[in-house]
């Protein structure tokens, strides 16, 4: 590709990053805290593209004004190089789905022992993340959960034997390193279970737990008393590990 074409691709890449960073699309790729860096990278790429096009145009005009006329001998660049633009257009036009049950059932639960347990409100239902509930249930033996009404939100995944899990993909940096944390469901489970359906679960702590068949990691359970479908959240990933 010539310099003008390179600057065009750079401009499109920068515009794609700005588009993702100014909408919720970036949450499908990276954690929320990286938004400023994403916007900065897009601005730098656009500035680089404009500078490249300007310098290339100046150099072309200088050559035309100083060089003697010569017979034309064009060497066109291969058109296949413009296929590089397709991923950029896909980034702008197509919002990829977040990782779901397919990834969760093929990857072992990645529960990590928390460094500390933040204080919980003394009354009312506990609205916890899947990661927070699982950590307290496994590594704190549910001491802060016993006797409390708990609400969790996540998507459904079914094990090979049909065991339903409420899952949230937890990430450290970006979707490429997202790993599932699973909570088994027992009690008043909905009669029809569709993988990747997002649910808000209300229930109580139960000491029952099993080992993940993929990696033998611990999977705690929750005793479900009510469940209702909810829309996919704006940020489908759990960033508890980053707080």
Image (cartoon, rainbow, N blue to C red):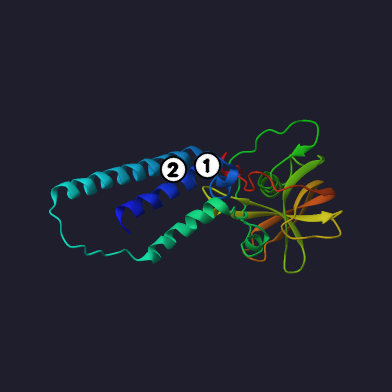
Q: Is residue 44 above or below residue 101?
A: above
* Residue 227 in picture, x, y percent from top left: 83, 49
| Position of residue 203 in the picture relative to residue 2 (left or right) | right
| Position of residue 160 in the picture relative to residue 23 (left or right) | right
For disc 2, the marked residue is: 42
Depth order, front residue of 10/77: 77
* Residue 185 in picture, x, y percent from top left: 78, 55
Q: Is residue 97 above or below residue 143?
A: below
Quadrant in which the N terminus is drawn: bottom left
Mark drawn on residue 11: none
Q: Are marks 1 and 2 in contact (CB under 8 Å)?
A: yes
Q: Is residue 54 above or below residue 179?
A: above
For disc 1, the marked residue is: 21
* Residue 226 in picture, x, y percent from top left: 85, 48
Q: Residues within 10 Å of mark 1 (few under 14, many from 20)?
A: many
Quadrant in which the C terminus is drawn: top right
Task: Say whether disc 1 or disc 2 marks the residue closer to the N-terminus.
Answer: 1
Instruction: State the residue at coordinates (19%, 46%).
Output: 62
The residues tagged by marks 1 and 2 sit, at their Cα atoms, a distance apart of 9 Å
Instruction: State the residue at coordinates (43%, 46%).
Output: 14
Instruction: State the residue at coordinates (67%, 62%).
Output: 212
Local secondary structure at mark 2: helix
Local secondary structure at mark 1: helix
Depth order, front residue of 63/139: 63
| Position of residue 46 in the picture relative to residue 239 (left or right) | left
């Amino acid at each position: 590709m010539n310099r003008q074409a390179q600057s065009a691709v750079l401009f499109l890449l920068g515009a794609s990053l700005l588009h993702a960073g100014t909408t919720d699309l970036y949450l499908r790729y990276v954690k929320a805290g990286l938004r400023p860096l994403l916007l900065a990278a897009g601005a730098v790429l656009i500035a680089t593209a404009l500078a490249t096009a300007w310098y290339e145009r100046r150099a072309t005009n200088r050559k035309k004004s100083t060089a003697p006329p010569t017979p034309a001998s064009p060497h066109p660049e291969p058109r296949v190089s413009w296929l590089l633009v397709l991923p950029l257009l896909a980034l702008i036009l197509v919002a990829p789905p977040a990782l779901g049950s397919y990834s969760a059932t093929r990857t072992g639960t990645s529960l990590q022992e928390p460094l500390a347990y933040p204080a919980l409100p003394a009354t009312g239902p506990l609205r916890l993340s899947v990661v927070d509930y699982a950590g307290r249930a496994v590594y704190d033996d549910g001491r802060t959960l016993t006797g409390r009404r708990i609400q969790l939100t996540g998507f459904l995944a079914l094990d090979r034997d049909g065991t339903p899990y409420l899952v949230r993909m937890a990430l450290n940096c970006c979707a490429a390193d997202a790993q599932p944390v699973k909570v088994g469901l027992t009690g008043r489970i909905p009669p029809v279970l569709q993988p990747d359906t997002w649910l808000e679960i209300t229930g109580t702590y139960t000491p029952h737990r099993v080992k993940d068949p993929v990696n033998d990691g611990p999977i705690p359970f929750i005793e479900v008393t009510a469940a209702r479908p909810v829309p996919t959240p704006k940020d489908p990933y759990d960033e508890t590990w980053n707080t």
